[in-house]
Structure formats: structure tokens, C-alpha cells
Image (spheres, rainbow, N blue to C red):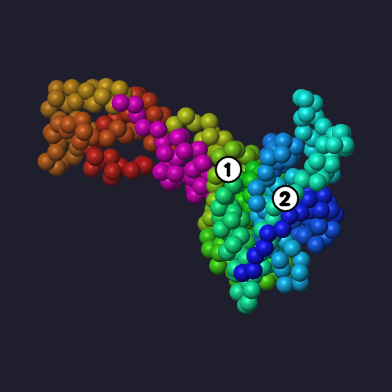
């Protein structure tokens, strides 16, 4: 790999800079010779009023911004390997997209005194330009990209895969799934967790359509010029969930809706009944795993393991055990009510507390409460056999 050090002023690097609020669009500098946001780069994430401002404050104080890396392509153009966040912050400030505080007063670039303006424009940035050679030039650049991005804000898994499998497919995917200006994200936000700019919505969409084999799917579709399959599947999953449930809950964000879609989308459901059951379960203090509510209801309300139902408190268990045991000893029968009515050798056995389980007399799933009145102690064998009956 060929390498060289060069110096560019901020004015040079930001020459021709145009900031497009629609993510996924390339940003350019050096009068069009430099691609600031090549397709394998993550989206701009410094626009938070802290990190972008810190870049400008560092320049004004004369602090170094650190080494920046460019890649020289086969056609002689340059693209940013590392430094996109810093360069974009500089360009956005010059374009009046945000202000910095000077003497506790917000100041845009045009509001700075002339000396401060010239100081920013003439500040030099040290750039390390590298150029891949031979048939594996692209591979060298991508490997270099991953290596230098270890520092700072590390690339997450999907950002790394976007770099490795960059091409028309990734570009199209980012335009749809990594674009916070896409109006559809308002609907998606009810069912997805993560940061759209950090490629986490795209990662979810790929995970669903690939059944968890994201890297294989990206490799197979790298040169595709449309994303019809992933978009259609993703929309089908979201629309299915949106149709089934009338209300949304924060716990929906942690659900693998693609997996539930595969298991249940062919089943007929009454959305009003489903929504009523969900609402009741979400307000039930006995349900400790609220995110399991949705699959529990979709599956016919049979697998209570999904809900992690609250157990009886220890004081209730000890009290019910003593009451049953005292009564059993007087009657000379087993303190397990099911053993007591049986015909086996345990008909009169008094079980130890640790040999018994607390059980709902009326099953919780059938409306039984987790209270002392609805608690009985059963030997472990009978409790396992009783199940959810």
C-alpha cells in the first residue's frame, strides 16, 4: 500500500461542502475531489450539540484534531477513511448548521470576528493518504478502514459489515433504513430499539429477512441494485404486528418480531381480544417478564414460562405449609392433599418443606391469584404432574 502525509487547510477540505440532511447521501469536499462520506462509512452521528461543538472549540483553541486518513481511488479521487465526523462537523459549522458559545453567547460562523473566521479557515489538518495496490486494493482499504476505526467511537457490527460489503445494495439499504428523515421510522420506532443512524434498524431488517444470517445475505446481495426483498419482508412484519395489536408498549422494542411473524402470522386473530388480553397482562403485578406477554398471547395463552410468573412469598409458603402440616397430623394423613387422597405408600407421609412446592389452587392462567388464599403446598412429584391444570 502506498502512503504519504499531506496538509490541507479547513478551507480547502470544506471547499464545495454541501450538507444534506438526508442520510445516506455522499458529502463532498476539496472542490468535489474528496468524498467525505463514502458508502462504507457510518452515518454522521456528531450532531448532538456536544461532539460537533467540541470539534469547533478545539480548532478555536488551537488544539490538534488528530490524524485524518484519506484513501486514493483508482480514478485519482479521494475518500475519507477516518475523520468523517470531524470534517462534517467543520463543514456544517461553516454552513451555519449549528453555533458555538463564545463568552456564553451562541455564535454562528458568520457572527465570528474576521480574525476567528480566518483562523478556522487557515487551520491545517494533517492527512495520511493511502492507496491500495493490485487486485486486492479494495480489500486492503477495507482492512485499513477497520483497523483505524478501533479508536474513538468503535464501529458496531453492522457498520463494519457495511464497509466490508459496500456496494449498491448497502447504499440502497441505507437510504431506507438508516435515514432518520424517512417518515416510516415513526411507525418503526414502536417495534424497534436502537439508533437509526448507527445502522441498528438496518441490522434488524437484515436479521429478519436472512433468518439471522446477515453476513451471508449481504454477501449474496452485495451487487443488487434494488432492495425489494428486504423492504417487502420488513414491511410485512411491521404491518402484521401493527394490525394485531391496537396499543404499543415500550416492551415491544425488545421483541424479535421477525421470529414471531414466522411462527404466528398465518394464524387468525381478533385484534380486540388480543389487545384486551395484552392490556390485562401488562397491568398484572404477577407477570414479571412483560416482554413475554406478546408471544404468550399469540401462542394461545398456554406457555406461562414466557411470563416468569411471580412466586408465592416465603412467608406465605411457610404459613401455608404449617397450616397444612398441622391439619394433616391431626387427621393422620399426608400434608400433600393429592397424596392424601391417593392409594400409594405416601398416603400418610408428612413431607418436609424443602420437599414441597407452592402451587396455585386455581391456576394463575385461569384467573387464580398469587395470594395465601389460593396457595397450597404439594409434593414436588404431584406439583410437576399437575402442571397448569
Residue bearing the label numbered 1: 252
**Callout 2 secondary element:** strand
Magenta residues (range): 287-314
Identity of the residue drawn at 78% across and 50% down: 9
From what the image shows, is residue 314 above or below residue 216? Answer: above
**Callout 1 secondary element:** helix
Residue 380 in percent (x, y) is at: 24, 40
Left or right: 278, with 81 as reference point? left
Work out whether residue 173 can be spotted: no
Work out whether residue 63 can be spotted: yes
Local crowd at mark 2 within 10 Å, few (<14), some, or many (≥20)? some
* Structural distance between the alpha carbons of marks 2 and 1: 46 Å
> In this orientation, which residue lies closer to the viewer: 243 or 234?
234
Residue 73 in percent (x, y) is at: 72, 68
Residue 57 in percent (x, y) is at: 72, 36
Residue bearing the label numbered 2: 125
Identity of the residue drawn at 80% across and 46% down: 122
Front disc: 2 or 1: 2
Amino acid at each position: 500500500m502506498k502512503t504519504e502525509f499531506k496538509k490541507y487547510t479547513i478551507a480547502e477540505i470544506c471547499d464545495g461542502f454541501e450538507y444534506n440532511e438526508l442520510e445516506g447521501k455522499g458529502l463532498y469536499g476539496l472542490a468535489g475531489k474528496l468524498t467525505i462520506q463514502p458508502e462504507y462509512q457510518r452515518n454522521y452521528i456528531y450532531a448532538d450539540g456536544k461532539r460537533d461543538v467540541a470539534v469547533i472549540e478545539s480548532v478555536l483553541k488551537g488544539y490538534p484534531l488528530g490524524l485524518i486518513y484519506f484513501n486514493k481511488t483508482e480514478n485519482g479521487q479521494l475518500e475519507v477513511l477516518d475523520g468523517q465526523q470531524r470534517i462534517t462537523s467543520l463543514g456544517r459549522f461553516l454552513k451555519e448548521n449549528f453555533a458555538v458559545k463564545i463568552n456564553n453567547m451562541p455564535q454562528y460562523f458568520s457572527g465570528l470576528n474576521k480574525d476567528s473566521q480566518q483562523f478556522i479557515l487557515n487551520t491545517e489538518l494533517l492527512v495520511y493518504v493511502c492507496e491500495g495496490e493490485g487486485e486486492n486494493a479494495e480489500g486492503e482499504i477495507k482492512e485499513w478502514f477497520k483497523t483505524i476505526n478501533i479508536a474513538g467511537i468503535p464501529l458496531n457490527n453492522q457498520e463494519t459489515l457495511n464497509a466490508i460489503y459496500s456496494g449498491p445494495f448497502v447504499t440502497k439499504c441505507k437510504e431506507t433504513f438508516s435515514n432518520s428523515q424517512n417518515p416510516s421510522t415513526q411507525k418503526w420506532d414502536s417495534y424497534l430499539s436502537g439508533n437509526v443512524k448507527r445502522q441498528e434498524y438496518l441490522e434488524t431488517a437484515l436479521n429478519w429477512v436472512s433468518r439471522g444470517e446477515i453476513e451471508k445475505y449481504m454477501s449474496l446481495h452485495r451487487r443488487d441494485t434494488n432492495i425489494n426483498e428486504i423492504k417487502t419482508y420488513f414491511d410485512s412484519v411491521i404491518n402484521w404486528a401493527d394490525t394485531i395489536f391496537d396499543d404499543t408498549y415500550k416492551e415491544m422494542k425488545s421483541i424479535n418480531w421477525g421470529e414471531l411473524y414466522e411462527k404466528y402470522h398465518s394464524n387468525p386473530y381478533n385484534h380486540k381480544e388480543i389487545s384486551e388480553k395484552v392490556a390485562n397482562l401488562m397491568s398484572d403485578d404477577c407477570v414479571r417478564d412483560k416482554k413475554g406477554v406478546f408471544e404468550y398471547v399469540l401462542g394461545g395463552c398456554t406457555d406461562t414460562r414466557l411470563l416468569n410468573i411471580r412466586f408465592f412469598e416465603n412467608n406465605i409458603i411457610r404459613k401455608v405449609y404449617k397450616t397444612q402440616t398441622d391439619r394433616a397430623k391431626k387427621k393422620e394423613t399426608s400434608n400433600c392433599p393429592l397424596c392424601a387422597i391417593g392409594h400409594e405408600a405416601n398416603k400418610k407421609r408428612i413431607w418436609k418443606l424443602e420437599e414441597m412446592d407452592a402451587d396455585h389452587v386455581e391456576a394463575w392462567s385461569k384467573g387464580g391469584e398469587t395470594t395465601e388464599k389460593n396457595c397450597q403446598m404439594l409434593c414436588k412429584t404431584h406439583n410437576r404432574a399437575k402442571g397448569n391444570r
